[in-house]
Image (tube, rainbow, N blue to C red):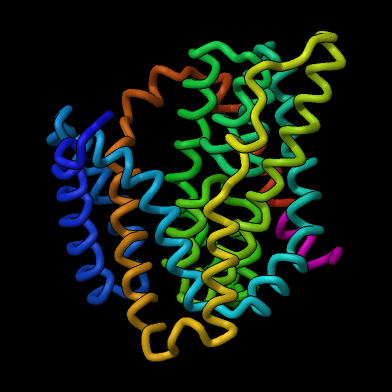
């Protein structure tokens, strides 16, 4: 059991980077604190490096602090807005999920990758990045190198999305709502959705976050389907499958805080403070994620996972745009 003191150095690093990112974000609002936070983390890790004494707190910031920031964000949104946005985006989310699995299977099969690796890349692209891969890997009984390769691939395109999506959104003159829907359905990981959305605009960030949370819930039925397929193929139960383990509980708490704010239990005067706290926690989390990015990791991954990830990601991003502008 790790003590609080073991986490404090890493917390301190991400908190300092978050403060710097928020200051820079105020000076350069078109870039925003989210992009600065993740960029500062990448810069630190690939120049100075992250010492072992910092890694526990950095890792916790990158995962748990992000979840807390989204829970606090719920205080700033009405449940009507959350439910309306989430439900309206499901048609596009479900379609892009199916496209992701299909494309990753076809490209992975063509490149002669392992079935587990192509499934994990499709799963991570489709739903929730590293969280989805972590949930699916025990069901698939994936090897450690398959998990590492798929996570490295997804992580690379998460980072690219933070910089590429806002630039393309401005180039296409997308509205806040259209960009939020695109980012929420086409960017892999929740952290990258948050960073891309809020670097575009506050409204786009709010919209993208809700869409992404609705999409992340699909991790549960998809894992159940995956377990069913695996059970059918192997004719034996999967001892490692756990509904409690895969369910993204922070989304449920996000809904709870949104309800508390909507019914007036959470005071209105505190909402601006909650928004500022959420932004700071997001900056902490994103700097922590940036501190885990290693360019050497991507060089070791090889071209097959990267090609599969790139084509799958491009198919999801392109189909999301086509669906929202021409179909739904």
Q: How many marks?
A: 0
The reply, left or right, for residue 204 in relation to residue 314 is left
Give the main secondary structure, helix, strand or loop, of the magenta stretch: helix
Q: Quadrant of residue 6?
A: top left
Among the 4 quarters of the image, the one containing residue 182: bottom right
Residue 184 as seen in the image, left or right of residue 288: right
* Residue 31: % across, % down: 35, 67
Q: Where's the C terminus, which quadrant?
A: bottom right
What residue lies at 30% left-to-right and 65% top-to-bottom?
A: 280
Where is 48 relative to 147, above or below? below
Question: Is-magenta flag for residue 325?
Answer: yes
Residue 273 position within the rendered picture, expressed as x and y whole percent measured from the top left: 33, 80
Q: Which residues are magenta?
A: 320-328
Residue 125 forms part of the magenta stretch? no
Q: Would you say residue 249 is visible in this rendering? A: yes
Quadrant in the picture for residue 59? top left
Residue 310 visible from this viewpoint: no
What x and y, as percent, mark residue 117? 62, 19
Name the residue at 54% across, 38% down: 131
Task: Identify which residue is drawn at 15% across, 50% down.
Answer: 12
Residue 233's place in the image compared with 207, above or below, is: above
User: Which residue: 77% across, 15% down?
Assistant: 237
Quadrant of the rendering where the N terminus is positioned: top left
């Amino acid at each position: 059991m790790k003590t609080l003191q073991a986490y404090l150095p890493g917390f301190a690093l991400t908190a300092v980077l978050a403060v710097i990112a928020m200051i820079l974000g105020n000076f350069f609002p078109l870039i925003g604190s989210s992009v600065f936070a993740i960029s500062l983390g990448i810069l630190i890790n690939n120049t100075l490096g992250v010492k072992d004494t910092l890694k526990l707190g950095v890792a916790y910031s990158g995962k748990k602090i992000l979840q807390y920031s989204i829970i606090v964000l719920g205080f700033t949104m009405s449940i009507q807005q959350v439910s309306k946005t989430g439900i309206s985006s499901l048609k596009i989310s479900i379609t892009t999920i199916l496209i992701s699995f299909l494309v990753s299977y076809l490209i992975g099969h063509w490149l002669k990758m392992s079935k587990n690796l192509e499934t994990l890349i499709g799963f991570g692209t489709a739903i929730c990045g590293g969280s989805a891969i972590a949930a699916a890997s025990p069901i698939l009984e994936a090897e450690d190198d398959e998990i590492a390769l798929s996570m490295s691939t997804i992580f690379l395109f998460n980072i690219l999305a933070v910089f590429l999506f806002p630039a393309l959104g401005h180039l296409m003159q997308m509205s806040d709502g259209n960009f939020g829907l695109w980012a929420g359905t086409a960017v892999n990981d929740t952290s990258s959705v948050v960073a891309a959305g809020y670097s575009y605009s506050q409204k786009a960030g709010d919209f993208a976050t809700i869409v992404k949370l609705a999409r992340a819930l699909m991790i549960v039925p998809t894992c159940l389907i995956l377990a069913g397929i695996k059970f059918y193929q192997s004719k034996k139960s999967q001892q490692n499958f756990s509904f409690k383990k895969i369910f993204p509980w922070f989304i449920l708490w996000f809904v709870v805080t949104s309800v508390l704010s909507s019914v007036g239990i959470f005071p209105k005067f505190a909402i601006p403070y909650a928004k500022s706290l959420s932004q700071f926690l997001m900056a902490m989390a994103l700097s922590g994620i940036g501190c885990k990015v290693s360019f050497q990791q991507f060089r070791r991954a090889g071209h097959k996972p990267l090609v599969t990830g790139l084509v799958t990601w491009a198919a999801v991003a392109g189909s999301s745009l086509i669906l929202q502008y021409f179909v739904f």
